[in-house]
Image: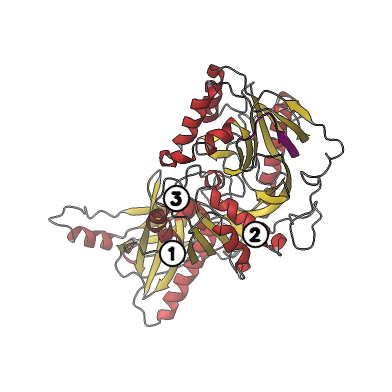
Amino acid sequence: MASQMPPPAAWDLATISVTCESDALSGKPGAGDMLELSGGGSLSISGDALVYREGIKQAEKRGRGSLCGIGGSGAPQSKTIPLYNILFADTTDGSIHINYADQTSPTRIVVTKLRVPLPYSDAPTSADTVATSFIDRLLSLSYGPAKLKKRAYVLVNPHAGPGGAEGIWQREVEPVFQAAHMDLTVVHTKYSGEAVKLVEELDDLTTYDTVIPCSGDGLPHEVFNGMANRRDARMVLGTVSVSHIPCGSGNAMSCNLYGTHRPGLAALAIVKGVVTPMDLVSITQGDRRTISFLSQALGIVAESDLATEHLRWMGEQRFTYGFVSRIFGKKTYPCDLAVKVAVEGKDGVRAHYKRERSEEAVNKLVAGTGSESGGSRVAAGCEASGAESELPSPYESDEADGEGLPRLRYGTIQDELPAGWEMARHDNMGNFYCGNMAYMAPDANFFSAALASDGYMDLVCVDGDISPAASLKLMLSVESGHFFDNPLVSYRKIEAFRIIPRDQDDGYISIDGERVPFEPFQAEVHRGLGRVLSKRGGFEAPGPRDWDSVSRGERLRA
């Protein structure tokens, strides 16, 4: 196990007397969620926050304790802690201890402890009972549908990205998990591909709630494939969630699930994460079948990524360098392509996205999984902490061979082209990019309409013979959020594809950012095959611009 952080800071409060009038039947915080403290102070649950109000006696004591009056005015102070930031609470050694994540800046959190001594009483069990009742209430509201005290199998890749993953784990992540009383098994990987074997051969994998790679996006790829290689692949993929602590160059998984590439904030999101079904993609190439969770690429994006591996010390900027250094050559990547299209054109894709998001919002309200804002962990109904929403089976539409992976509906790359597919020549392909998530890097939302489990991949194609100026504008449109609307971009929702590179002996094909042989391959999506922990039950990407605007036709029908 990694070394411990120094003990977290604590608020030392004077002995108090405690009362509680919590309404146990209410599903949301109310005026009764309060511990009254002696001297007029209190702990209360108000809206989406825990509020500590200092009493007069405690304020006077703090003021007298300062040096010549400096550092303490003696006036009562208050502290507001978002429920989302509450990690754990219990009663030990005659005190109430509340661990929380104090956000000291937009990019950093620090584990802190609020300590409230229990009062002296001839019947101490009475104070303990009241305090325990308040704590149970606090944790239930703070965690909502998320599971408390998750059990995690953690994989730390010390060589991820520009390095330093071990230090990130020790300084920014492990303290958060420990403060949340998570049960941790920590393994440090030694070589590429080791995680596949570790996950494939782990006998008690299903006793864990989540597998957490601390790495770039390569280690999650290995984890999903380790699960897929197991005899019980169907059960494991649908039971054990995969999470991600961002320590690499791209960190796409964390950006999509938690809306951040900051390790500490991702750790907090995992603590409060909810189990979410996610589509996975089967890739067949030669006689091999692998699983993809993120993307498949041939063209300038794949080459800009994989051909700059030697520049990992540059971090995220190596992708930009690789792209800019190639666009002036107007390079093309000829290929033959067959696609099983589900939704054609940007208007259709935007309508599909709106329909799916609307249904998702209704389902959340019905299931009582909390607000859309993410700030509240309040569930509709007084569910016990740790209760997960019932999730649909990922195999409702796919036949499966025993307990293994689902049967391929469209065969493999070695089979005849499926009926109804048409192979088309693309002599001037500049970028073939198929995504299963929206963000490919913190500032690279290539697939604005991607959804966690809509059963489709998002396919982007761009010609390679456009001018360097147009290519630069295209690159800048990714960062500005206008890529989806760029007229040079073809965008479709698809179920499967087959791609055959042509006219070059060697090149770059990327699967989840990992290089694979420069050979034909085929892909098909499996709806909801995997499980991940997400912040709010889906991706954090904003979606195509104006997807939620009301059309003229909708206004007329209202």
Image coordinates for residue 122, horizontal then vertical, percent: 37, 83
The disc placed on residue 178 is 1
Q: Earlier in the sequence, mark 1 or mark 2?
A: 1
Q: Crowding near pointer 1: few (<14 within 10 Å), some, many (20+)?
A: some
Left or right side of 353 for 323:
left
Residue type beneath disc 3: Pro
Q: Which residues are magenta?
A: 493-506
Q: Are marks 1 and 2 in contact (CB under 8 Å)?
A: no
- Nearer the observer: mark 1 or 3; the answer is 3
Q: Which residue is mark 2?
A: 227
Q: Is residue 380 visible?
A: no
Left or right side of 78 for 238:
right
Q: Earlier in the sequence, mark 3 or mark 2?
A: 2
Quarter of the view holding residue 252: top right
Q: Which residue is mark 3?
A: 263
Image coordinates for residue 105, horizontal then vertical, percent: 37, 45
Vertical side of 127 occupied by 386: above or below: above
